[in-house]
């Protein structure tokens, strides 16, 4: 699969630091003066497919399995991997986190988290938190944004007309051009309210006769509750990613509160441990706000993650909007290692299709 973009100066500088052997020394120096919490954000771990035949969103593939194993091995060797619930306990007790604390998180709940990521994490001995959209685990229905990409890639329609976004465009025959169109749609639709987004996708399903309710595609399949329970029994923890993966701040307040409350009720019913962790779906600065944070706290969650790029120097101050470091599939081992060691310099700007913001968004300190 071709990279989603040239690595640029971050990638080249990261590889240079990595090959020179300087990174671990720089990391140790940094740990003396800054003990910020680093939280890695993944979506999917799977072999990189052929983009000309893969019918879903390539941007959601964070890394292939071999590179994921290497990344986790590095965390195990050079950092202090911690469960988010242990971080909650430390914050509640007013205790400082150990230097070089790193938490590994996954969003959405794709079944490759169970099939591929979890066995590697277990093998290496790194804990992780999986934020799942409970409605998709309940039904097995594909995720709406990914299904939208699928429809744009595979529809036989000659044009795509989206009056909601002022888009009326011919659909070219080549897959790369359609992927670019799909990426533009994903970016622009995040300005709509959540119900408007759902209505637009549902209308296309009807117009193009591509109903997601009848689909169980292997390449876009959520985990099952049996898989989730097996992972929990193995020591992994789970948190909420909403019910229907809707942008919470784009919902009416009563629906937003219901989405948060019902996701926790379902997790508490299906799993042994109560759900105390939240990751805001989409997670950019338009996906959550003070009302969402208040509803999350009121529902009984004790910590929440955004998808805004950055680290957390004082996680007690933003424990309901923690920054994360997105892992992207075009990161080589040097770039990944440099991002962990020097995150302010080397982290990837928040992906536009996830954070609903410009790709040039700087990484937060």
Image (cartoon, rainbow, N blue to C red):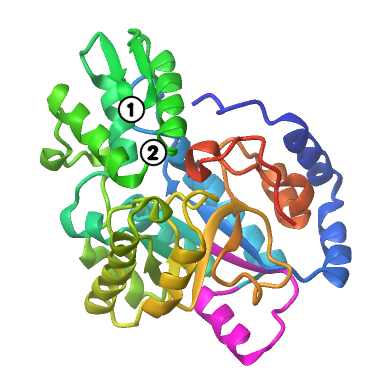
| Residue 114 sits in quarter | bottom left
Instruction: Locate the C terminus and report the quarter of the image it occupies.
Output: bottom right
Would you say 323 lies left or right of 14 here?
Answer: left
| x then y, percent, for residue 316 | 65, 77
Dot label at residue 175: none
Identify the residue at horizontal 70%, vertical 48% (top origin).
363
Residue segment shown in magenta: 82-104
Residue 210, located in which quarter of the rendered image? top left
Q: Is residue 288 above or below residue 5?
A: below
Locate residue 209, reporting x and y percent. 12, 25
Residue, x 48% and y 37% (percent of image)?
353
Residues at marks 2 and 1, CA–CA distance in whole angstroms: 8 Å
Q: Residue furthest bottom?
A: 93
Q: Is residue 84 left or right of residue 101?
A: left
Secondary structure, mark 1, is helix
In this rendering, the answer to whether 57 lies above or below 283 is above
Q: Earlier in the sequence, mark 2 or mark 1?
A: 1
Q: Is residue 21 above or below residue 73?
A: above
Is residue 2 located in the magenta-colored stretch of the structure?
no
Image height check: is 222 above or below 46? below
Report the disc number at residue 192: 2
């Amino acid at each position: 699969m071709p990279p989603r973009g040239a690595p640029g100066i971050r990638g080249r500088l990261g590889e240079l630091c990595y090959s020179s052997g300087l990174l671990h020394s720089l990391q140790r120096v940094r740990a003396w003066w800054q003990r910020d919490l680093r939280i890695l954000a993944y979506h999917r771990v799977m072999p990189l497919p052929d983009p000309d035949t893969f019918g879903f969103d390539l941007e959601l593939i964070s890394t292939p399995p071999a590179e994921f194993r290497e990344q986790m091995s590095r965390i195990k060797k050079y950092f202090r991997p911690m469960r988010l619930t242990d971080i909650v306990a430390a914050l509640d007790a007013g205790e400082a986190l150990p230097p070089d604390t790193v938490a590994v998180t996954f969003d959405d709940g794709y079944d490759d988290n169970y099939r591929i990521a979890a066995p590697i994490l277990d093998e290496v001995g790194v804990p992780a938190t999986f934020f799942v959209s409970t409605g998709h685990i309940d039904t097995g229905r594909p995720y709406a944004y990914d299904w939208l990409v699928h429809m744009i890639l595979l529809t036989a329609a000659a044009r795509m007309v989206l009056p909601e976004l002022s888009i009326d465009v011919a659909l070219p025959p080549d897959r790369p051009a359609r992927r670019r169109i799909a990426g533009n749609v994903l970016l622009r639709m995040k300005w709509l309210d959540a119900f408007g987004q759902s209505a637009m996708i549902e209308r296309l399903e009807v117009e193009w006769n591509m109903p997601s309710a009848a689909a169980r595609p292997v390449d876009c399949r959520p985990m099952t509750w049996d898989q989730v329970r097996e992972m929990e029994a193995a020591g992994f923890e789970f948190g909420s990613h909403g019910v229907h993966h809707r942008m919470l701040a784009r919902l009416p307040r009563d629906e937003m509160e219901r989405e948060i409350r019902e996701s926790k009720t379902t997790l508490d019913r299906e799993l042994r441990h109560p759900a105390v962790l939240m990751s805001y779906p989409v997670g950019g600065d338009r996906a959550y706000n003070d009302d969402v944070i208040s509803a999350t706290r009121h529902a009984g969650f004790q910590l929440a993650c955004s998808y805004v790029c950055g680290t957390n120097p004082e996680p007690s101050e933003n424990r309901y909007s923690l920054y994360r470091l997105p892992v992207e599939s075009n990161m080589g081992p040097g770039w990944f290692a440099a991002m962990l060691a020097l995150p302010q310099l080397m982290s990837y700007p928040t992906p536009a299709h996830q954070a609903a913001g410009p790709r040039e968004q700087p990484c937060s300190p």
